[in-house]
Amino acid sequence: MPGISRRKLTRRGLPAFFLTYGILTGIIWIGLPVIGWLSMAKESDLKLVSGSVQQRPRWQRTKGGPIIVIPVEMDDGVHDLTVEDLSHYREIMNLRPGDRISARVISFFGYRVWELNLEAVTIESYQDTYLYRSRQNERGAEAAPWFGLISLVCLTLALGLRIYFGTWRDPARFAPVDAENSVQQP
C-alpha cells in the first residue's frame, strides 16, 4: 500500500519502537483529562444565538458517537447547531422548519449547543448539558490511568532493551551501502 512503511521491525529496533509508543500513550494519558477540562464551558462563555429552523433536525454519526444537527437561519446565514446530549432527543427531533429557536452555544469549530429554547420553552438546559459533559469527562478520566500504565510499561521496556542491545535501533540498517549492495565494513 502506498504511504505505509515497508521497514520490518527487528529485535534490535524494539527499543525505539517501545520508546515511541511509550511517548505517544503518555501524551494521551496527559491529554485526556486536559481536553475534558477544556471542553467545559462556563455560562459566561456562552454566546446567545437565535433564528429559524431551516430543515428538520438530522442524526449524524461521528467518531465520538451520534449527534443531532439542526440547520438554523441566523442573521449572518445558515449555521448547523450540534447537540451532543441526546437525553432530550424526542423534543429536538420534533422541531419543524420555521420554528423560532434560541440557543446558548460555544462557537469553537461550529456551534455546540449548551442550552436550547423553542419560543421561550426550554428544551435542553445548561445544567443538563453540564452534567452530560461531566459524565463524559469522568469516563475519559477513568481511561487515562490505563494509558499511563501502558506508557510506563513501554518506556520501561524501551530502557531495558536499550541497556540489553546497547543501542536504540539497529545500526546495520542505517549503514551506507556500496555499489554491490553490501554493507561497508569500517
Image (spheres, grey):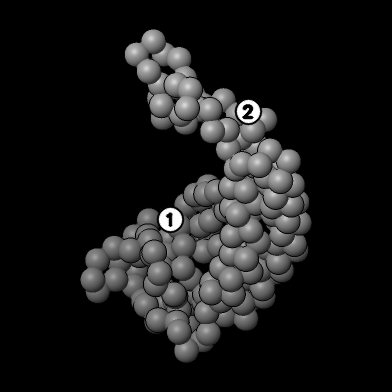
Q: Which residue is mark 1?
A: 56
Relative placement, left or right, of 24 versus 163 is: left
The residue where tag 2 is placed is: 10
Q: Position of residue 171 (x, y in %)?
A: 54, 33
Of 115 and 15, the residue lying toward us: 15
Q: Quadrant of residue 141?
A: bottom right
Q: Secondary structure at mark 1?
A: loop
Residue extending farthest left: 76
Distance between the alpha carbons at the discs numbered 1 and 2: 56 Å
Quarter of the image for the N terminus: give it.
Answer: top left
What residue do we see at 29% from left, 63% from top? 78
Whether residues under marks 1 and 2 lie with C-beta atoms below 8 angstroms apart, the answer is no
Residue nearest the viewer, comparing 115 with 9: 9
Q: Is residue 58 visible?
A: yes
Task: Please provide percent x and percent y for residue 147.
Answer: 70, 56
Name the residue: 63% across, 28% down. 10
Q: Quadrant of residue 16?
A: top right
Can residue 85 be spotted in the picture? no
Q: Residue furthest bottom?
A: 44
The amino acid pointed to by label 1 is Arg
**Residue 112 percent across, percent down from the top left:** 46, 68
User: In front: 159, or 49?
Assistant: 159
Q: How many marks?
A: 2
Rendered location of residue 89, percent (x, y) = 59, 61
